[in-house]
Amino acid sequence: MTALKGIVPPMITPLINESKLDYRGLEKLIEHLISGGVHGVFILGTTGEAPSLSHALRVDLIKYVCDQVNGRIPVLVGITDVSLKEAVHISDKSKEFGAQAVVLAPPFYYQIDQNELYHFTEQLIGEISLPVYLYNNPGLTKVSFEIETIRKLLSNPEVIGLKDSSADMVYYHRLLKVAQDSEVPLLIGPEELLMESLLIGGNGGISGGANMFPQLYVSIYDSVNSGDLNKARELQRQVMELSGIVYSGNGSSSVINGIKCVLKHMQICPNDYIVKPLNKASKDKSERINQYLTNQKLYV
Amino acid sequence: MTALKGIVPPMITPLINESKLDYRGLEKLIEHLISGGVHGVFILGTTGEAPSLSHALRVDLIKYVCDQVNGRIPVLVGITDVSLKEAVHISDKSKEFGAQAVVLAPPFYYQIDQNELYHFTEQLIGEISLPVYLYNNPGLTKVSFEIETIRKLLSNPEVIGLKDSSADMVYYHRLLKVAQDSEVPLLIGPEELLMESLLIGGNGGISGGANMFPQLYVSIYDSVNSGDLNKARELQRQVMELSGIVYSGNGSSSVINGIKCVLKHMQICPNDYIVKPLNKASKDKSERINQYLTNQKLYV
Amino acid sequence: MTALKGIVPPMITPLINESKLDYRGLEKLIEHLISGGVHGVFILGTTGEAPSLSHALRVDLIKYVCDQVNGRIPVLVGITDVSLKEAVHISDKSKEFGAQAVVLAPPFYYQIDQNELYHFTEQLIGEISLPVYLYNNPGLTKVSFEIETIRKLLSNPEVIGLKDSSADMVYYHRLLKVAQDSEVPLLIGPEELLMESLLIGGNGGISGGANMFPQLYVSIYDSVNSGDLNKARELQRQVMELSGIVYSGNGSSSVINGIKCVLKHMQICPNDYIVKPLNKASKDKSERINQYLTNQKLYV
Amino acid sequence: MTALKGIVPPMITPLINESKLDYRGLEKLIEHLISGGVHGVFILGTTGEAPSLSHALRVDLIKYVCDQVNGRIPVLVGITDVSLKEAVHISDKSKEFGAQAVVLAPPFYYQIDQNELYHFTEQLIGEISLPVYLYNNPGLTKVSFEIETIRKLLSNPEVIGLKDSSADMVYYHRLLKVAQDSEVPLLIGPEELLMESLLIGGNGGISGGANMFPQLYVSIYDSVNSGDLNKARELQRQVMELSGIVYSGNGSSSVINGIKCVLKHMQICPNDYIVKPLNKASKDKSERINQYLTNQKLYV
């Protein structure tokens, strides 16, 4: 695949219950994203609740999404796992169903050093046949891909891009230099940092909020690229406001249940089911979100 | 099962390679443990590399161990997983093959609060049919079972014991009070703290070192119970010395590869294969261990 | 001075306000401690609010305490400071007024490595004329005295003892070996761990609770030394109960304001003034403490 | 004073030894900064080694700097201390010698909550007569000024500005909104983030590197203000390169000894003495810096 740049939503997984996908919600969500102009879609990430899903359900999701997208935009699949073999399995299924690339964060149970991380990743890349985005997310995986580890892994041509969710912009700056030296794109996770990452030379965002308002995030991307800094600032201000309301709360639940709650109010995914251990939005939060959506001129 | 007290080694998993158990090593190891007087065996824990093993291999291991032990001592199986459904699956297999109980630590990917941890655990316990040991291990799972969460979960009679690997003895003291109020045993993880945990009223240890020298750990347990404090101190001193040499190094590899290296030198498990991302003992470490074993009067 | 073993309360500083000592409270407290059988007193530690006090007030306190104690028990003075020169100044004053030793934790602002910590400490010891207790307290100083750093510093005969408040009993075990090799005493900070530290060979406690109930802590020390494990367990159980009530709350305030509140109820120090940024006990906490003191048979 | 915007170097403290300022180096450094176009100077910060200096030396420095600057640019003085009274003392001296404002980070020893931090800060502000910049620096002070705490403190008109060294740009974004609501400037600490902080609306930088190359940092500030994004990016790239070389190493020493080493090579401050516990640049680092300065076209 060619280098992916732009806005690639980390898709939430619409669910009826913990064992069953909401196929209709899934179809509507995918069409909502594509018509919103996103440049790709990333399934089975943190936002997609991948770690909480059974392996069977993950495979089901990959198949359905690849079929529905049908080549219109690239599909990236998260394969992060504590077991190398299980990660290879998900990658094989992704290849079989037509995904374009996989996204790989470090194994997240044991305490490992950079040498161990390098060899795990290098072996894993060697055992799969889809190209790989390396994904740094130390808040959840405990271990970080250090700059020099990334540089070594980039000597493998199967590594075609990078994603960083550290929210550490000094690290991001240094990673950007490595990405540019290797001519691969670097995408940022936290949408609160989308505009500035683009202004300093980053290539796009894996923005959770693009599940809800894809055009808002695509417009930030376009505004920066066209040099319209004032527009970019105003749109980023809207992202900050949204973030303060929709993602309010603590822990991993807060972002995912906020997005699912908005998609329910927007009648894209009527079911806001979330797999344990995460929790759906409280009634209070749901009401604050509803009020916000009502008063807000929806982003276009 | 009746309350398990005493020394329960967290068994390492003897492997030929990442997809194949070392059945002969496994058989010899199990017999070594039983003849060493251990009070039970705990498979598929951290020391057993469970998170790194494929699900198929885990099931294979459960079956083999249960067959080999054949009811002589209780078999406990680690079912900790980021996905509730996958944890239930391993528990079902454990029941099917004849294990006596399962051991459950918190799901270890998302950032969750105590309320989320409680509901996840409560649902999981409800879906399985083996009794449960709750296992606190915040260094690896990020979230801790707080005292009040444990107290609430103990109202479920399916929770029959506790294990703590926090290495936080103030927490252990408070947990011990809760365990005693509910009349369930509390076992400690870090073997460096075995003697003192027993002296203050704890009920045993999930001691990694008991893979190698089961009698040493059983003797500490017996010495404290018989009031022979001087003997207990001398044996614990040997554990500290062993710990400084066999577990030297950093990160999760250091303990597991030390044990596997000793078992290789002892010709119990000739293969010290370890699954990525962990690393086998360096040549230097292996030589230091060999020297230690040679000069040391072996524990009896 | 000869090696100090036993119970050495980290004395709270009785205050009228942030600029004025409560001399009468101070006198009563010192007499309370000495008649309670403590083996020494440690002033200007964390519990003594030293970092919050002006330098002038610290000097005033040293003089008053040394005069009042008048050689009946050793007086140790905390000199921990971010500035080496200011630490030397407090040590000089301690010497001048007749204190027996100083207690030194690492400088607590900058991020430093063990080499830097070693050279800072070595120079400081060289510039003062009182013997030194090294004090490990990483929760507040950020940097820990690693075992090898302590071992090197112990080659200086001016280092006559160790205190550890890490609450990390694996570290304590390893430190104990170093202390024994150098024949210096090792005292423990957290009183919740007092009994077990003594059982494994430690030499005493810098127990905050001994400000209130010196005999309780002295009795634990004596019980372990005389081999009465049952009595030690029962007394330690009382310490755990006290700790749960008197130190309830979060942060550094909780311990210090609990002690000051009890001393107020006991009419030893009628004023429970505490210097900002710390906070006195809430009305609720004060009432819980009062109830606890009323229902409790006072420790003898 | 009017709101300070732009580049305000956190001045290093030129020293002959731990008790003596290098007055000639100090004079040359101040003239170097003023001729480089900086908008103010901040003394006795982290970069100025304030915590390591004796109180007497701090007072000496304030007097000398205020005399030498003589009103040409504003002088800000760091008063951060663990003791409120000692902070007030330094502020009084700053006022006496003619400084324009003080800079205050949280007290950094005890573990305190936001309520305690608020009341400490509010009392301190009430006791001093110079206007205050609040300074967030959780990596060194352990506690962070949370957004709502800052908002409450800003209701006091004596708080005239903010500085953030958290390197957390999501926090910075939220803080920027509060600063703009209160119409006070927000300056950023880490120079690696200078350009992006300005692009999203920040007001300047407390950039350590401006000790060495004031014009480089002033040019970044001017480039962003004039809308020359390409120039800003190129200059920021130079800052990143400088940062990688001059600040190489770990811990607090690395930045300060890098700056002192460069100023020595530039013959502005011939003495690179640094107070313990920090360490001067190793010979290797000094040589790498020398080579860098030789090959580099000096920034203009």
Image: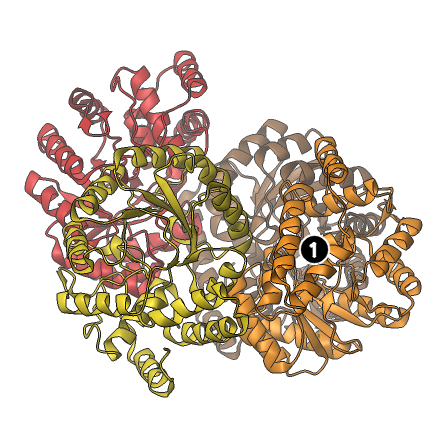
Chain colours: A brown, B orange, C yellow, D red
Residue A47 found in image quarter: bottom right
Image point 85% across, 61% down: which residue? B34
Residue B97 in sight in this render: yes
Image point 37% across, 26% down: which residue? D258
- Please state if B237 lies on the left or on the right of D159 as rendered: right
Tell me the amino acid under the disc marked 1: Ile
Residue B212 place in picture, x, y as percent: 78, 50
Residue most toward the bottom? C295
The residue that disc 1 covers is: A43
Image point 86% across, 42% down: which residue? B271
Residue B244 found in image quarter: top right
- Give me the chain letter of mark 1: A
Where does the N terminus of chain D fall, quadrant-wise? top left
Residue C18 place in picture, x, y as percent: 16, 61
Residue D36 found in image quarter: top left
Residue A277 place in picture, x, y as percent: 64, 69
User: As rendered, which of A56 and B69 lies closer to the eye?
Assistant: B69
Residue B100 place in picture, x, y as percent: 82, 72
Residue C34's place in the image compared with B280, above or below, is below
User: As rendered, which of D160 and C67 lies closer to the eye?
Assistant: C67
Image point 24% across, 55% down: which residue? C52
- Please state if D62 lies on the left or on the right of B268 as rendered: left
